[in-house]
Image: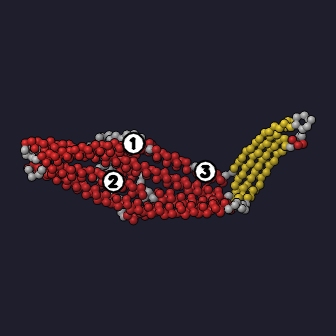
Amino acid sequence: MKIPQYIYVLLIAAALLPVPLHAADLMAVYREALESDAQYSAARAAYQAAQEKLPQGRAGFLPNITFTGNRRRQLIEAGSNPERTIDAQALTVTATQPIYRKENFAIYEQAKIQVLQANSQLILASQDLILRVSQAYFDVLTAQVNVEVAEAQKKAIGQQLAQAKRNFEVGTATIVDTYEAQARSDLTASQEIAARNELEVRKRALQQIIGRFPDNLARANENSSDLLKLRYASMDEWINVAEQNNLPLKIQQAAYDIATQDIERARAGHYPTLDLVALYSDQKGVGAAIVGTGFDITSKEIGLQLAVPVFQGGAVQSRVREALANQERVLQNLNNAKRNSAMQVSQQYLNVSSGIAQVKALKQAVLSSKSQLDSTILGQQVGVRTEVDVLNAQQSFYSARRDLARAHYSLLMSKLRLEAEVGELDEDALIAVNDMLR
């Protein structure tokens, strides 16, 4: 008994199920993540906190005004003399305007660098969010493909198993064909269970980022020609751009600049300080406990205050040595970051290059495996192919479809990571990827 050709057409089409009309695309999921992702929200709060470093650093150049006041009542007993009550009060206002404090200059320079560093850290957090959202999004799509392939295989092998049993009953096939189909059916059932579990896990991972359980997601168009386009032609060009724009490098460079200013702060302990000091004091009841009748004193002072450090037990020299050692540590971290950046750019560039070639090859493999499946089905119908041959051809076709989807999503992620390594990953890059969805 021949299997109708349309059954195989339906089985093949099952691996290419259409996406619902209202499927959420990558940009929609990303915008949800901007509002819901806790990790990115923490980065924004850290950025806002870092902006306060600048006014704090600037405060070292501005006046410092202090107000103090007190009021006292004394009860005095002197031998046989009657008890006396003395009221005294004082009001003092002190204003200090720094004129020269070397440490304050270093603190202010550090504040400016810290703000720039915070800007880079926020952009890096934004890029990290794009990568995490995209990876979680494509992981869900990959898991969906695995489920659909498992379902299609299960249906196809179920049909083959039923046919093998009928052929054995009428004597046109051996029991070996039935056993082979049954073994494939059992294996595919277990693969379907594993695929569904993996899909649930991947959806939960995306839920952690966007704060809700994801519904239908738009798929990538595997025929998009934009996959073959790169912004820069050679690996060296990508590395050169990364040397200028790589965000971890900028952050590490800022850390080195901050460490340099730490040395200046430590050395400032050797320098004198000069302040303009103004004081206003209004005191009442001064000396009443001694002379019996207090005096009211009002004083006004203004002058320069010079402090010259002479010896502080060697603490300043120790802090300078400590700052120099920390600067060396940060310098080595910077050198390591430069090497790591070049390595990551090279790796992602090679991933993209090989990914493009792999996608091309797998597209051809899908076409070839489909032609093989069609010819094997035809061969079975005319008696020159067996049930096992059809099962193997189906397995090859579904494996090629699954591998193509995986390679496609892996290529998209490699492109995004490559752009992140050179500091050019932004929403425009994500929109370009989103335009490849359908």
The quarter of the displayed image where residue 414 is located: bottom left
Q: CA distance from mark 1 to mark 2?
A: 21 Å
* Residue for badge 3: 55
Along the line of sight, which residue is nearer the eye, 391 or 108? Answer: 391
Please determine whether, in this image, residue 119 is positioned above or below residue 193: below
What residue appears at the point 24 percent right and 52 percent down from the top-left corner? 400
Residue type indicated by callout 3? Pro
User: Is residue 160 at least partly visible in the picture?
Assistant: no
* Residue for badge 1: 207
**Other residues around mark 1 within 10 Å, as few (<14) / some (14–19) / many (≥20):** some
What residue appears at the point 61 percent right and 63 percent down from the top-left corner? 321
Q: CA distance from mark 1 to mark 3?
A: 39 Å
Along the line of sight, which residue is nearer the eye, 156 or 170? Answer: 170
State the image coordinates of residue 53 (x, y, percent, origin top left): 58, 51
Along the line of sight, which residue is nearer the eye, 18 or 382? Answer: 382
User: Is residue 291 at least partly visible in the picture?
Assistant: yes
Q: In the figure, is residue 407 to the left or right of 2?
A: right
Q: In the figure, is residue 128 to the left or right of 370?
A: right
Image colouring: secondary structure
State the image coordinates of residue 33 (x, y, percent, origin top left): 42, 44
Residue lying at the far left of the rendered structure = 171
Question: Which of pointers 3 and 2 indicates the residue nearer the eye?
Answer: 2
* Residue for badge 2: 410
Upstream in sequence: badge 1 or badge 2: 1
What residue appears at the point 28 percent right and 56 percent down from the top-left corner? 359
Q: In the figure, is residue 241 to the left or right of 45?
A: left
What residue appears at the point 69 percent right and 55 percent down from the top-left corner? 98
Along the line of sight, which residue is nearer the eye, 241 or 351? Answer: 351
Question: Tag 3's secondary structure?
Answer: helix
Question: Tag 1's secondary structure?
Answer: helix
